[in-house]
Image: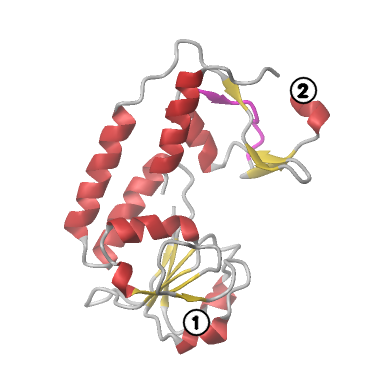
Amino acid sequence: MRRIRDSKFRLWFFCIVLITVSSVALIKTPPAYAYGRIVVLYAAASPILKELGVGNRVVGITRTDKTFDDAVKVGSHLEPNLELINALAPDLIVAGSVRAFPRLMAERVKADVFYYDPRSLEDILVKITDLGRLLGKEQEAAGLVKRLREKLSSVTAPSKRPTVIYEISSKSLRVAGGRSIITSIIEAAGGVNAVKVQKKHVLLSPEKVLE
């Protein structure tokens, strides 16, 4: 498979990756107030919270998250320290997928849980709105969604759509599958994901890639 040489496509692709910043909410009761103490267990959600202007409410983050300097590190997204999380007394946890933060684990924390696991660019925009509602930042969320839609609408696809394989990990070559949000990003940039397997991540051999 040929390498991508279309510099314009690569530019738009990485612009869209930067824009990418669905989730299922496990909200026990609709809050009568905006959540005030947040632990973020999925670093990709942190830029959204920062854009919404609620960084001062974030009390805990994962060890790889560099968004909020004053927040306490609470482990990794797959192995969070539940005792430390409960000690921080959050009222909302923003987690990744249910697989990463299972319901049984969620029941051990004294907080509502919002799952952020986007499958498409449109999902991201919808869930920004959801977070804005939960955090009392509807106006800020609407403004952010508007700006992102404008950026997406400005993307011009290349005349010839390149076929793309997106590498997630080089060790035991893992690539983005058909159910990954990366597929949505590639398509929005004017490309085609060469991997059609309907999984988020797919293991491939280097020989298969070169076919």
Which comes sooner in the sequence, label 2 or label 1? 1
Q: Main secondary structure of the magenta part?
A: loop
Q: Report if residue 146 lies within the magenta region.
A: no
Q: Residue at x 76, y 36 (%)?
A: 204
The crowding category of the residue bearing disc 1, from other C-alpha atoms within 10 Å (few below 14, some 14 to 19, many at least 20), is many
Does residue 104 show up? yes
Image quadrant assignment for residue 32: bottom left
- Say if mark 2 contacts mark 1, CB within 8 Å: no
Specify whether 207 is left or right of 91.
Answer: right
Residue denoted by label 2: 210
Q: Could you tell me the amino acid type at mark 2?
A: Leu
Residue denoted by label 1: 85
Q: Is residue 170 above or below residue 58?
A: above
How far across and how far down the image is residue 165, in percent?
64, 30
The outermost residue toward the top is 159
Tell me the SS state at disc 1: helix
Tell me the SS state at disc 2: helix
The outermost residue toward the left is 139
Q: Could you tell me the amino acid type at mark 1?
A: Ile
User: Which residues are the magenta region?
Assistant: 191-198
Count of marks placed on residues: 2
Q: CA distance from mark 2 to mark 1?
A: 46 Å
The outermost residue toward the front is 69
Which quadrant does the N terminus fall into?
top right
Q: Residue at x 50, y 11 (%)?
A: 160
Q: Which mark is residue 181?
A: none
Does residue 109 show up? no
